[in-house]
Amino acid sequence: MTTLLTILVFLTVFVEVLLIAAFFRTGSGGKDVAKRLAAIMADVTEEAAADADAASVLVSREEPEGFKGRLTQTVKRVKADCDAFGWGKNLGVRIGLIALGSFLLAMAVGRMTAYPFLVTMSCGVLFFAVTCAVLYLRARQIWSADLAASLPEAIDSIARICRAGVPAQTAFGLAAQNLRGALATELATVDQWLKLGVPLKQVLQESATRVPVPDYRFFCVIVIISQESGGRLADTLERLASTLRDRAELALKVQAKTSEARASIKIVSCLVPGVLIYQYIQAPADFHFLVTDPTGLKVLFYAAASVAAGLLITWAMVRRIQ
């Protein structure tokens, strides 16, 4: 039983560390922005190119000092993301249902051990944290992908509007009328702030902070530089849209090449829980041996560790290709 408690504590701490690292991790989009800035903005004036680094810093998120500052920023970012996902109105209900389901499942596990309260609380926190993290990261991934997919079309629309002689401040609202999804909502928000008299530079800085997509932040950099230093904004935006389409096509090819490995990760990740559930239903005595006997716990721990190590290696290989 001591071994089981040790495993539960280890898993709880490990998952919490991963969640903290995932929430506090700053994206690498700033470096990508700096690299692509010189390649795409060849037709921007020298003054604009000189201000490129400053604009990139302006669009990047400010790094707060200390753990409390980073925690506050993370909470604000998660809350803003939940509002963008459409979870703001029923966020409390969602959290309550997840907590209820997590602790009911934890109670089913804890009642089979010699320390039901301790195991229930540990497993409940673990299940709740994992479920919330998976749902949040999945929703953020879908939202970001939807926004990135419609970004080239939006940039083309803004470029055509600007080429027709319409000011950039007005182009955002007109482009939002012809779009749907997350990007249309964001551009409409930008247009509302501009109509209230907020400067374009400030509005785009705040918009880039809300949207965790490097390509969108790069788009904001281009517009800010063009407005401050001059330049052919329509031509630059058209080149940016073309580049984004080429990158999206390449990403689809990479996704097709790695589809088998990603499918294997999903199948293997469900293998151990599926076997345990099947064993709990068909052979309760064997399942009880795995979770209570020291030998069974060692077998269970090494099996889970081996599968986790294999999944981690496969995931790292797929990420390197992507």
Image (cartoon, grey):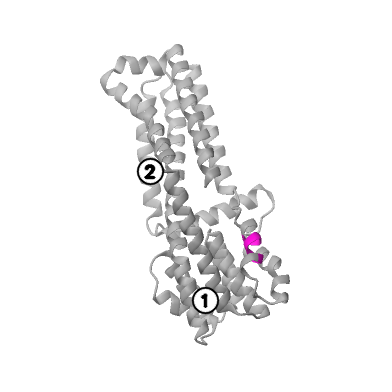
Q: Is residue 191 toward the left or the right of residue 200 in the image?
A: left
Closer to viewer: mark 1 or mark 2:
1
Q: Is residue 225 toward the left or the right of residue 214 in the image?
A: right
Percent position (x, y) of residue 79? 49, 56
Q: Is residue 205 magenta?
A: no
Q: Secondary structure at mark 2?
A: helix
| Of the pair 216 and 115, the residue shown nearer to us | 216
Residue at 45% over, 12% down: 295
Q: Residues within 10 Å of mark 2 (few under 14, many from 20)?
A: some
Is tag 1's residue or tag 2's residue first in the polypeptide sequence?
2
Residue at 42% over, 41% down: 131
Callout 2 amino acid:
Ile
Q: Is residue 36 magenta?
A: yes
Percent position (x, y) of residue 278? 30, 25
The residue positioned farthest toward the bottom in the image shown: 165
Callout 1 amino acid:
Trp
Above or below 273: residue 193? below
**Residue holding disc 2:** 98
Q: Is residue 73 visible?
A: yes
Q: Secondary structure at mark 1?
A: helix
Tell me which segment is drawn in magenta: 33-38
Give the overall secondary structure of the magenta segment.
Answer: helix
**Residue holding disc 1:** 193
Q: Residues within 10 Å of mark 1 (few under 14, many from 20)?
A: some
Q: Is residue 80 visible?
A: no
Percent position (x, y) of residue 227? 62, 79
Cα distance in 3D space between marks 1 and 2: 36 Å
